[in-house]
Image (cartoon, grey):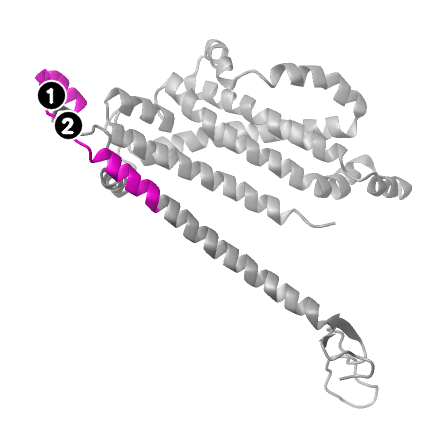
């Protein structure tokens, strides 16, 4: 140890190579004259923090698995109940299913749902007519509509949010319109869209655009207006132009807030598309749910519900990861 260094301390070598002296060849190594003093307690604390994070993740995973197993067990027990056989009209018994006519629970159990999911996974893209398409086709239509309306909303909301956040005048001028239009249910626009656009596919995209617009617009405006004034004052002192200031200072600082708004919007868009497709029909996971309900295929309805949740979680986690990538401690 060097002079005056405590016993519970450590040295960290900074990677600064020393050039060899002129006139003779010498192997370059680390410059031990430039040593950074780091207490050993800080190194131990950092290692403990990483270990605790891994431990917390493992414990959370175990709890999640236990909750899922409990849910499946309760579901299985709830669908195992049986009662006395009820005499029914043959046509009605055929409609509601053999289990209900025999006094058993009409709700499918976990095994029935898993077998149905496996059946759909084996052939997800079959097409046997208008009302009989695979889940892969239905999900592809829904995701395409969501992405079209969502990206259109991104193209409108982010520039408009920058304008509102950077200009107090535009903020005051546009605020009444935002406050009036924001609370309107997206599905309330559907009849007007069908009447004016006269196309169910484009009407669904328009509804997704409307419901995705407001969270992104408001979050962008808030993030832009909340950028630290010291950074903007330095940019003005250095005579940085407005456009360059927006891209080099405001955008990186407001990016976490903007992506949070985008994350909220994608969740709302995926939620609304199911209801919109139930109304307009044709194709899509929402129409699939409604059509299977009309056929009293509860197993297919539950299968579609599970897939809707999984796709929504994937979309949310993608934007959550993007948000973490642009978030930096000050």
Q: Nearer the viewer, residue 200 or 135?
A: 135
Q: Estimate the x, y position of residue 302 in percent, counting from the top left.
A: 31, 32
Alpha carbon of mark 2 to alpha carbon of mark 1: how far?
9 Å
Density class for disc 1 (Cα within 10 Å; few <14, some 14-19, many ≥20) is few
| Dominant SS type (magenta) | helix
Quadrant of image for the N terminus: bottom right
Question: Of discs 2 and 1, which sits in the foreground?
Answer: 2
Q: Quadrant of residue 275?
A: top left
Residue picked out by circle 1? 86
Query: In this picture, is 172 found above or below 226?
Result: above
* 160 relative to 86 in the view: left or right: right
Q: Residue at (56%, 43%) from the top-left corner?
A: 320
Q: Nearer the viewer, residue 99 or 216?
A: 99
- Residue at the far right: name it: 237
Residue picked out by circle 2? 83
Q: Which residues are magenta?
A: 69-97
Q: Residue at (66%, 18%) from the top-left corner?
A: 178
Q: Are marks 2 and 1 in contact (CB under 8 Å)?
A: yes
Density class for disc 2 (Cα within 10 Å; few <14, some 14-19, many ≥20) is few
């Amino acid at each position: 140890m060097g002079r005056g260094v405590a016993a519970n301390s450590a040295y960290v070598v900074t990677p600064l190579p020393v050039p060899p002296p002129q006139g003779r060849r010498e192997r370059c190594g680390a410059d031990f004259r430039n040593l950074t003093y780091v207490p050993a307690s800080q190194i131990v604390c950092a290692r403990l923090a990483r270990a605790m994070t891994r431990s917390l993740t493992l414990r959370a995973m175990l709890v999640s698995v236990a909750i899922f197993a409990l849910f499946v067990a309760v579901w299985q027990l709830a669908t195992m109940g049986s009662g006395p056989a009820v005499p029914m009209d043959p046509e009605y018994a055929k409609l509601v299913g053999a289990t209900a006519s025999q006094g058993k629970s009409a709700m499918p159990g976990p095994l029935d749902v898993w077998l149905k999911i496996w059946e759909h996974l084996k052939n997800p893209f079959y097409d046997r007519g208008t009302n009989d398409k695979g889940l892969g086709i239905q999900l592809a239509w829904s995701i395409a509509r969501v992405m079209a309306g969502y990206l259109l909303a991104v193209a409108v909301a982010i520039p408009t949010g920058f304008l509102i956040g950077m200009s107090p005048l535009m903020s005051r001028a546009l605020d009444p319109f935002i406050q009036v239009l924001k609370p309107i249910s997206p599905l309330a626009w559907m009849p007007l869209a069908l009447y004016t656009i006269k196309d169910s596919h484009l009407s669904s995209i328009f509804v997704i655009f409307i419901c995705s617009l407001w969270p992104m617009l408001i979050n962008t405006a808030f993030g832009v207006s909340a950028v630290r004034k010291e950074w903007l004052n330095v940019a003005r002192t250095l005579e940085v132009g407005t456009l360059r200031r927006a891209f080099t200072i405001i955008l990186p600082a407001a990016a976490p807030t903007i992506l949070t708004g985008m994350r909220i919007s994608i969740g709302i868009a995926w939620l609304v598309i199911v209801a919109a497709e139930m109304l307009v029909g044709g194709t899509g996971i929402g129409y699939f749910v409604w059509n299977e309900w009309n056929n009293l295929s509860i197993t297919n309805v539950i299968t579609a519900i599970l897939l809707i949740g999984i796709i929504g979680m994937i979309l949310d986690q993608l934007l959550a990861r993007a948000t973490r990538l642009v978030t930096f401690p000050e």
